Image (cartoon, rainbow, N blue to C red):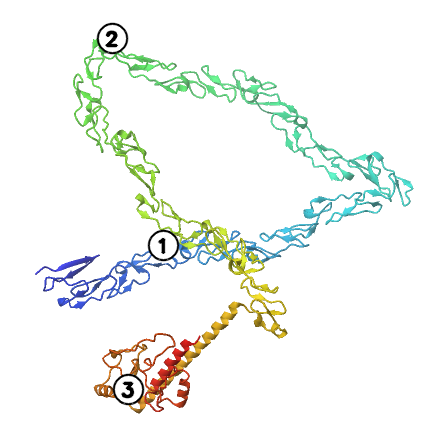
């Protein structure tokens, strides 16, 4: 016997026992002898012993018939969904199905600006800066706009958010529908247009200057002058009296100084002085600090400046400048109107009033051109130097600059041992010497050494007293100048430096151990200790990968990868970014593919282009959505559905090119034109058939007759009463509709008759059942085909029927009763005899009716009614008191249906 088998799915083990036979239970059976059928659903496995179900991911229940509860998914429905904002997750994979208005892996992000709805695929229709709701797409309009798509400005008198604020403008001022700012009518100003124009101005925005003279005022709206008494003219420029005279009869001479007088009043003789003059007779200049007409304008000058009595222009004092004499002369200038140039050198500046120089520290003389004398320093050279040991003194700040070998603030301290030079900042550079000079730094060498720094021994190959002996060292080794012993160069050893360092050692005296080379072909070099790196690595330990763009031995090869492909530092092979393939990543993905190595297939539709990098679809004109499967919303077309349709009169526009599909009765580029006179219908391609000056409907072609005519085409003369009949102007379409209505009414009447017959049949069956419970039941089939299998009879009844030879035999009814007929076709019970279908509509031969009994049993009314339906020549009747009255009723019903089919 074979051992039990084990089936694993996930972490659940199902042991399947081996049945007595050598065959396993089929996958849908379990139990002893595999006699029980598994009830597991949704691809779940069935335990062959117990029949228990092992559910697949996403299902639960004892038959695995139920998906995971909401909020759970995966194996045994134990994983919690991480979807947010009302999203649901797939019960098998846990993938989030976002609610409208949200997107992202976990549906935690709102739709991007400009989109909303399911999968954020619906385009926001908001205009004029409106913001749409990320779920419903409802527009939140900015101030000044209203409507479902924020396309309507606020009505007159309203502004702001939701047009809820009342405009505050007065005096017929208009307000901006966004900010509410008032645009004043001519003659008014102010934030709310509540103020009249200032005196002397008028018109829109009070921008025009009044041109009224002689003290006249002007109207703030249109600038019309209102003249003072004694003056006239459009600008009040004319006097009633001639110049030089005044009084009621112009008989007095003006007492004003004529050269300084603008005019004298024609009635009172009062003098009006020109600008810059004052006094009773205009013979006095303006007092200090005033200027202008009537010397009423105060001067606006600073720093003790005077002003011109006529113009008010400031006359600045020396050292000042500017329109109001408020600015001091700029550096380098001085005097009246700052017109003179300073001549100072090495100065801080010069006086703006008289140009005198202010010298910097360390300089003197009138023009600051002479440096302070030796031993003096500071402002005006009034400080004495205190430096020692011939140190120099800075004329600016008195700082001592010490000579070589000295230091300190006063240069009175010598340099310490081991230092020399200026400020003792240099260090002696002597190796084999007693000391160095504190001033020059020259070394005092020990015996046996030479050179500037006393660091030179005998020349190479020489040693001993006065370098008279020859060295025997090899491989760059040097010998001791005292005793001639060899000092080997790095990487060599031995008395004569003939041998290399042992493996694993390098450097001076072979005392250094090689570092652990990471990617090297062997031990380090015996001289430098450097590792010999494998291709793709460099560095002293060969632990650094080649820099970007390089590969191979010593990283000398240049990578050939393009389009930001990653180059292997070892052999230079390229690893391409998403959207590129080829040895050097120079080939873009073929059309229809994207992603790394172009393994993903594009899912874009309707001619959309797929990005080779991320698979994003770039929709063609007229399409939108994530995969370009949705047409542009109604009213939009073109690329990205940004174009607005211009169709009129309810026409639809093509979502690709915006071409208008006009409705019946309209033509034109935007369907703005009705059909020309004499045409109608779709595309205005049908010609009107109206006559006698009748008008034609541009949509339906209906003729509207002129007085005196009637008919579908208005081609018939009409009597006076016919003109009042509205049906004389009907169209051919309406005539056809009335004929169709008559046919529909006939069909409805026939259905009502059928229902009445069926009700009669049911009523009769109930009565028969009450009278005789032994009477056999009757059933019928909808079909009229006759077959022996459509009914069954008891043996006794079969004998009776077979002997009669003239019983009623309808293949659609099964009965045990015997017909009272004289001649009737006997249908054999073996199912071999059938009634042939009629060959032509309305033509029934007597053979078609042989399957029905004589209809004598029907009452007189039924017979009279039925006689209208039977074909001519048929003389069948039914007895009034027959048990099978319902059979006759059905016969009448069938005949009525045939009769109705013959009607036109």
Asked if residue 316 lies left or right of residue 713, the reply is right
Which residue position is annotated with label 3?
807
322 vs 201: above or below: above
Of marks 1 and 3, which one's residue comes earlier in the chain?
Answer: 1
Question: Which quadrant of the view contains residue 704?
Answer: bottom right
Of marks 2 and 1, which one's residue comes earlier in the chain?
Answer: 1
Which residue position is annotated with label 1?
106
Of marks 3 and 2, which one's residue comes earlier in the chain?
Answer: 2
Where residue 571 sits: x, y (%)? 26, 34
CA gap between label 2 and label 1 equals 91 Å
Where residue 82 sits: x, y (%)? 34, 56
Asked if residue 534 lies left or right of residue 287, the reply is left
Instruction: Please name which of the two marks, 3 or 2, marks the residue nearer to the observer.
Output: 3
447 vs 396: above or below: above
Where residue 886 sits: x, y (%)? 34, 85
Q: Quadrant of the N terminus?
A: bottom left
Where residue 2 sits: x, y (%)? 9, 59
Q: Quadrant of the C terminus?
A: bottom left
């Amino acid at each position: 016997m074979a051992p039990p088998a084990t089936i694993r799915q996930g972490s659940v083990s199902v042991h399947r026992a081996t049945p007595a036979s050598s065959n396993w239970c089929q996958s849908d059976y379990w139990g002893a002898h595999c006699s029980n059928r598994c009830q597991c659903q949704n691809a779940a496995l069935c335990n062959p012993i117990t029949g228990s179900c092992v559910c697949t991911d996403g299902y639960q229940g004892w038959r695995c018939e139920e998906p995971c509860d909401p909020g759970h998914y995966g194996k045994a429905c134990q994983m919690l969904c991480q979807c947010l904002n009302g999203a649901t997750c797939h019960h098998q994979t846990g993938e989030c199905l976002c609610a409208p208005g949200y997107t992202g892996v976990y549906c935690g992000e709102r739709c991007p600006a400009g989109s909303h709805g399911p999968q954020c695929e619906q385009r926001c229709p908001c205009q004029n800066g409106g913001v749409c709701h990320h779920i419903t797409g409802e527009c939140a309009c900015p101030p000044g706009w209203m409507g479902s798509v924020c396309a309507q400005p606020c009505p007159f008198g309203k502004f702001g958010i939701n047009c809820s604020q009342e405009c505050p403008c007065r005096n017929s001022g208009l307000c901006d529908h966004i900010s509410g700012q008032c645009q004043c009518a001519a003659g008014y100003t102010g934030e709310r247009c509540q103020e009249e124009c200032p005196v002397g101005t008028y018109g829109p925005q009070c921008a025009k200057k009044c041109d009224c003279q002689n003290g006249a005022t002007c109207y703030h709206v249109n600038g019309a002058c209102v003249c003072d008494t004694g003056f006239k003219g459009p600008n009040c420029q004319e006097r009633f009296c001639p110049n030089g005279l005044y009084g009621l009869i112009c008989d007095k001479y003006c007492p004003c100084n004529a050269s300084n007088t603008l005019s004298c009043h024609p009635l009172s003789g009062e003098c009006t002085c020109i600008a810059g003059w004052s006094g009773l007779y205009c013979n006095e200049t303006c007092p200090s600090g005033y200027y202008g007409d009537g010397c009423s304008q105060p001067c606006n000058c600073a720093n003790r400046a005077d002003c011109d009595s006529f113009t008010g222009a400031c006359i600045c004092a020396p050292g000042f400048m500017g329109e109001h004499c408020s600015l001091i002369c700029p550096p380098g200038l001085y005097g009246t109107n700052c017109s003179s140039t300073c001549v100072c050198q090495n100065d801080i500046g010069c006086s703006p009033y008289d140009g005198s120089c202010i010298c910097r520290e360390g300089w003197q003389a009138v023009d600051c051109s002479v440096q302070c004398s030796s031993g003096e320093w500071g402002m005006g050279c009034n400080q004495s130097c205190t430096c020692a040991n011939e140190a120099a003194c800075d004329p600016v700040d008195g700082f001592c600059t010490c000579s070589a070998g000295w230091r300190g603030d006063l240069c009175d301290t010598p340099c310490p041992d081991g230092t020399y030079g200026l400020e003792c900042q240099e260090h002696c550079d002597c190796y084999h010497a007693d000391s160095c000079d504190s001033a020059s730094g020259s070394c005092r060498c020990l015996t046996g050494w030479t050179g500037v720094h006393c660091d030179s021994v005998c020349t190479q190959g020489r040693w001993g007293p006065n370098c008279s002996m020859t060295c025997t060292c090899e491989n760059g080794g040097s010998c001791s100048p005292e005793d001639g012993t060899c000092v080997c160069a790095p990487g060599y050893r031995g008395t004569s430096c003939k041998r290399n360092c042992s493996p694993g050692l390098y450097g001076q005296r072979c005392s250094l151990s090689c570092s652990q080379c990471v990617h090297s072909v062997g031990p380090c070099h015996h001289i430098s200790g450097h590792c010999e790196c494998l291709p793709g690595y460099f560095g002293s330990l060969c632990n650094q990968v080649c820099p970007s763009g390089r590969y191979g031995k010593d990283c000398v090869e240049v990578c050939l990868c393009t389009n930001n492909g990653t180059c292997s530092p070892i052999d230079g092979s390229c690893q391409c970014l998403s959207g590129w393939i080829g040895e050097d990543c120079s080939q873009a993905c073929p059309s229809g593919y994207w992603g790394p190595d172009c393994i993903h297939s594009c899912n874009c539709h309707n001619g959309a282009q797929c990005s080779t990098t991320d698979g994003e679809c770039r929709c063609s004109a007229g399409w939108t959505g994530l995969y370009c499967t949705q047409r542009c919303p109604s009213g939009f077309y073109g690329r990205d559905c940004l174009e607005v349709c211009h169709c009129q009169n309810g026409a639809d526009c093509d979502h690709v090119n915006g071409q208008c599909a006009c409705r019946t009765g309209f033509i034109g580029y935007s369907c703005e034109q009705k059909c020309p006179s004499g045409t109608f219908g779709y595309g205005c391609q049908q010609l009107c058939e109206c006559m006698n000056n009748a008008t034609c409907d541009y949509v339906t072609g209906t003729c509207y007759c002129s007085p005196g005519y009637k008919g579908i085409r208005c081609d018939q003369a009409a009597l006076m009463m016919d003109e009042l009949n509205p049906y004389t102007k009907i169209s051919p379409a309406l005539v056809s509709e009335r004929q169709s209505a008559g046919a529909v009414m006939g069909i409805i009447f026939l259905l009502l008759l059928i229902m009445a017959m069926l009700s009669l049949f049911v009523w009769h069956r109930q009565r028969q059942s009450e009278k005789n419970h032994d009477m056999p039941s009757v059933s019928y089939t909808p079909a009229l085909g006759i077959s022996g299998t459509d009914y069954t009879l008891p043996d006794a009844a079969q004998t009776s029927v077979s002997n009669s030879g003239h019983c009623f035999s309808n293949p659609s009814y099964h009965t045990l009763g015997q017909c009272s007929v004289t001649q009737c076709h006997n249908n054999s019970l073996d199912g071999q005899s059938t009634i042939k279908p009629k060959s032509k509509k309305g033509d029934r031969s007597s053979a078609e009716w042989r399957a029905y009994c004589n209809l004598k049993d029907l009452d007189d009314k039924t017979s009279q009614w039925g006689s209208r339906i039977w074909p001519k020549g048929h003389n069948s009747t039914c007895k009034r008191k027959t048990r099978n009255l319902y059979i006759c009723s059905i016969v009448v019903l069938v005949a009525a249906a045939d009769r109705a089919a013959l009607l036109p």
